[in-house]
Image: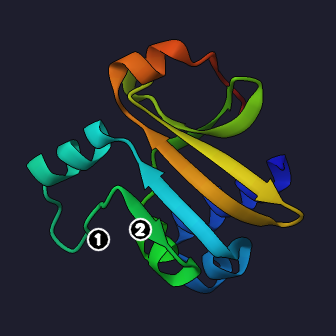
Amino acid sequence: HRAVVEAFLAASRGGDFAALVALLDPGIVFRADPAAVAMAAANPNPGAPILAPEIHGPEAVARSFAGRATAARPAFIDGTIGLVWAPGGTVRAAFRFATEGERVTAIDLVVDPAGLAEADIELAGD
C-alpha cells in the first residue's frame, strides 16, 4: 500500500500523466467531501480540472492530480498511509487511499474540519 501511494505522489508531483494512469485501477473513484467541492468552486484555479463530488476512471482522476501534489506530504491517516496538505504543520486536507495489488482503487479527499478532527493523522517522513 505504501509503495503505491508513494509512487502516486511521485507521479503527481512530476506531472507524469502516463505513470498516474498506470497506477489507477480501471474502476477508480475519487470522492471529495462537500467542503472540498465548495472550496474548489470558491477558489477557481485557471487550468485546474473542476472538482466534482465523484470523479470516475483513470484518465479523469489522473487529470485531477497530474502536477498538482507539490505540497502533499505522506501521513498515517487512521493507521494507513495517505497524503495530507498541511501548511505550517496544520492539516487542511487529507487524501485516503484504497489499493488493491499495485493499483489505487479509490481516493477520498477530506477537508471538512469536523472530518479532519475525527481522523487520527500523523505526519510521516517524506
Q: Residue furthest left?
A: 42
- Vertical position of residue 119 compared to residue 3: above or below: above
> Could you tell whether 49 is left or right of 121 in the image?
left
Question: Whole-percent x and y of residue 75?
Answer: 65, 31
User: Which residue is label 1 attached to?
Assistant: 49
Which of 60/8 is in front? Answer: 60
Amino acid at circle 1: Pro
Quarter of the figure with the C terminus = top right
Which residue is nearer to you in this view: 6 or 114? 114
Q: Is residue 81 left or right of residue 100?
A: left
How far apart in space, not on screen, are marks 2 and 1 (Cα)?
6 Å
Secondary structure found at label 1:
loop
From the image, tell me which residue sits under label 2: 64
Q: Give me the residue at 65% from left, 74% from top.
A: 27
Residue at image coords 49%, 72%? 56
What is the tally of numbered marks visible in this picture? 2
Give the secondary structure at mark 2: helix
How far from the left and from the top, in percent, is residue 8?
66, 62
Please tell me the numbered disc located at residue 115: none
Relative to 39, residue 49 above or below: below
**Res. 103 visible in picture:** yes
Q: Position of residue 59 (x, y in %)?
A: 51, 83
Residue sitting at 85 percent across and 66 percent down?
102
Q: Earlier in the sequence, mark 2 or mark 1?
A: 1
2, 116: nearer the viewer: 116
What residue do we see at 76% from left, 33% from top?
80
Q: Image quadrant of residue 28? A: bottom right
Among the 4 quarters of the image, the one containing residue 19: bottom right
Looking at the rendered structure, the kind of residue marked 2 is Ser
Disc 2 and disc 1 in contact, CB within 8 angstroms: yes
